[in-house]
Amino acid sequence: MCRASATSDRTLPAHGGSGYKIIGILEVGGGLYKKDGIDVEALWEFRQRNGTIHGFPGAETYDPAELLLTECEILIPAATET
């Protein structure tokens, strides 16, 4: 399992093909979580259409502070400035 704490347009698709499951992603104002793994391609398309990950139907809304404490094998702090 893998969790990205934040992501940019350049990193999200790359992690989906790595053989790991992305179980959580944080963005300013909230996060997403799905124990069995988030469909990264569907999330990427959703974010391209909506400009945010918030409201993505393929994962549950999750508190960012709780998500950072969720068990995973790898934590990727990938925040970028905009």
Image (cartoon, helix red, strand yellow):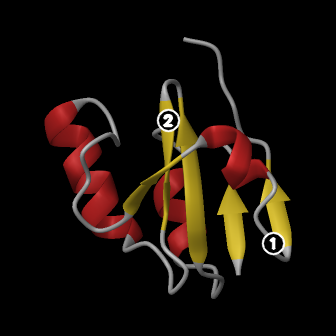
Nearer to the camera, 23 or 70: 70
- The residue where tag 1 is placed is 71
Q: Residue at coordinates 68% horizontally, 63% vertically from top-left?
A: 3
Q: Are marks 1 and 2 in contact (CB under 8 Å)?
A: no
Q: Secondary structure at mark 1?
A: loop
Q: Position of residue 18 (x, y in %)?
A: 63, 79
The residue lying at 46 percent from left, 60 percent from top is: 13
Residue drawn at x 70%, y 50% as measured from the top left: 66
Name the side, left or right, on which 65 lies relative to 73.
left
At which x and y percent is residue 55?
A: 24, 45
Residue that carries the numbered disc 2 in the rendered image: 30
Please, is residue 49 above or below residue 79 in the view?
below
Crowd rating for badge 1 (residues with CA inside 10 Å; few <14, some 14–19, many 20+): few
Q: Is residue 46 left or right of residue 27?
A: left
Report the amino acid beneath label 2: Gly
> Which quadrant does the C terminus fall into?
top right
